[in-house]
Amino acid sequence: MSQLKTKELLFNLCKDFVNKRLQTVEEIISSNQKGLQSETKSSAGDKHETGRAMLQLEMEKASQQLEGISIMNQILSKVDISKSSKIAHLGSVIITNKANYFLSISAGQLSVKNNTYFAISISSPIGKLLLGKKENEEVLFNGNLIKIKEIF
């Protein structure tokens, strides 16, 4: 499989990851809004207030998650998978002696054609180390020496 095709598949998996998170958060918000609307005053007023407060906290948490999703979408909009370089940059696939990485967003482990890749953010500890590196360079991460075999 071509390098561009691999990048394209990884990029699409990252987009799917963000879209699924967005859908989940939107469902939580919708559910909580319905919950807030259906919370009616009962004779147990304190219980009612506690329920509303808990729903309010859930809404705030979901709102923060929406911000994170928005940031991930902004980062993905800057990824140019057609750009190929031997220097690690946003959108690079980095093959090392330890693992394979896709510098984009933190989307975890992805599988493409029986190969495992880790979608990592350039602001993550390993992402910061790999950013700007070239093929055959080495980085020390968590006491492990990682040799970069290929970048595309």
Image: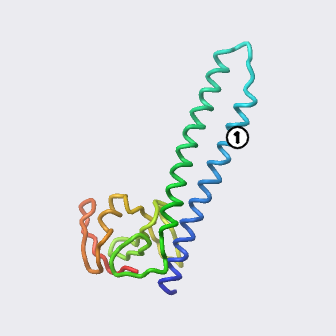
Specify the quadrant that holds the C terminus. Answer: bottom left
Q: Is mark 1 on a helix, strand or loop?
A: helix
Q: How many labels does the image show?
A: 1
- Asked whether 142 or 44 is in front, the reply is 44
Give the left or right position of residue 6, taking residue 150 as reference. right
Residue type pointed to by label 1: Ser
Residue 123: x and y in percent read 37, 58
| Residue 130, picture quadrant | bottom left
Is 32 situated above or below 74?
Answer: above
* Residue displayed at 69% across by 37% down: 33
* 100 vs 62, nearest the viewer: 62
Q: Mark 1 points at which residue?
A: 31
| Residue sitting at the far top | 43
Q: In which quarter of the image is residue 8?
A: bottom right
Q: Along the horizontal axis of the image, is 128 left or right of 6?
A: left
Q: Nearer the viewer, residue 37 or 102?
A: 37
Q: In which quarter of the image is residue 97?
A: bottom left
Identify the residue shown where x is 48% and y is 74%: 80
Dot 1: few (<14), some (14–19), or many (≥20) neighbours within 10 Å?
some
Question: Where residue 25 sits: x, y (%)?
Answer: 62, 48
Residue pictured at 67% horizontal, 21% vertical: 48
Q: Is residue 40 above or below residue 8?
A: above
* Residue found at x 64% / y 20%: 49
Q: Which colour scheme is used?
A: rainbow
